[in-house]
Amino acid sequence: MIDYFAQHLWQMWAVIAVVCLILELTAGDFFIICFSVGAAFAAIAAALGCNIYIQLLAFAVFSLICLFWVRPLAKRYLHKGEDRRVSNADALMGRHGRVVETVKADGFGRVQIDGDIWKTVTNEAQDIPEGANVRVVGRESTIITVETLKTEGHD
């Protein structure tokens, strides 16, 4: 049995490479795939008849090369523009919503934006009535600040 594994060690390296590729699909940060590349080169070394030390060296060297040179290039190319992408409550800035609970001038209310209801305050001197259209102009934690949208033809 040990002789079989020793003669077909390339299969183990191939399985490790595939498992690392599958794990990379769950992570998506180009880290685990580097070990998959290292395992692929170790599989090639094993198929060429190199001993286990050469295979381990190939695994380590190619994994490190991938980690330090290929990974940064891949992240820069495939994730370009991600730094500017806003998420969570920051993505609400400038969005329009509808008041579902009157926003008191000196208190709170509720606004619906894309199906989500947010606790809301306003800087305006008067209450914003239920049903009014508003725009998000600020936020503090999970409480958003809104202002009444001026409708065309009025003012």
Image: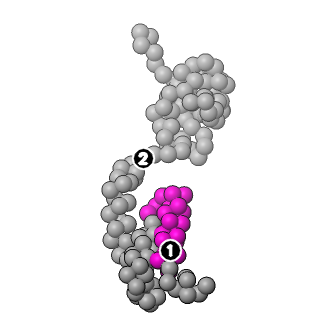
- Precedes in sequence: disc 2 or disc 1: 1
Give left or right: position of 77 versus 46. Answer: left
For the residue labelled by badge 2, is the local secondary structure a helix, a strand or a loop? loop
- Residue 51: image quadrant is bottom left
Badge 1 crowding class, 10 Å Cα cut-off, few under 14, some 14 to 19, many 20 or more, is some
Could you tell me residue 61's position as x and y percent? 38, 81
Residue linked to disc 2 = 85
Asked whether the viewer can see residue 147, the reply is no
Q: Nearer the viewer, residue 147 or 131?
A: 131
The residue sitting at 48% across, 58% down in the picture is: 28
Q: Amino acid at mark 1?
A: Gln
Q: Amino acid at mark 2?
A: Arg
- Between the residue at mark 2 and the residue at mark 1, the CA separation in whole angstroms equals 42 Å
112 magenta-colored: no
Q: Nearer the viewer, residue 106 or 119?
A: 119
Please say if the residues under marks 2 and 1 sit with CB atoms less than 8 Å apart: no
Count of numbered circles on the image: 2
Could you tell me residue 108's position as x and y percent? 65, 32
Residue linked to disc 1 = 11
Residue 142 sits above or below residue 73 on the image: above
Could you tell me residue 105's position as x and y percent? 61, 28
Secondary structure that dominates the magenta span = helix
Q: Nearer the viewer, residue 134 or 128?
A: 134
Residue 73 sits above or below residue 99 on the image: below
Q: Nearer the viewer, residue 137 or 57?
A: 57
Badge 2 crowding class, 10 Å Cα cut-off, few under 14, some 14 to 19, many 20 or more, is few
- Residue 60: image quadrant is bottom left
Q: Start and end of the magenta stretch? A: 9-32
Q: Identify the disc placed on residue 105.
A: none
Q: Quadrant of the N terminus?
A: bottom right
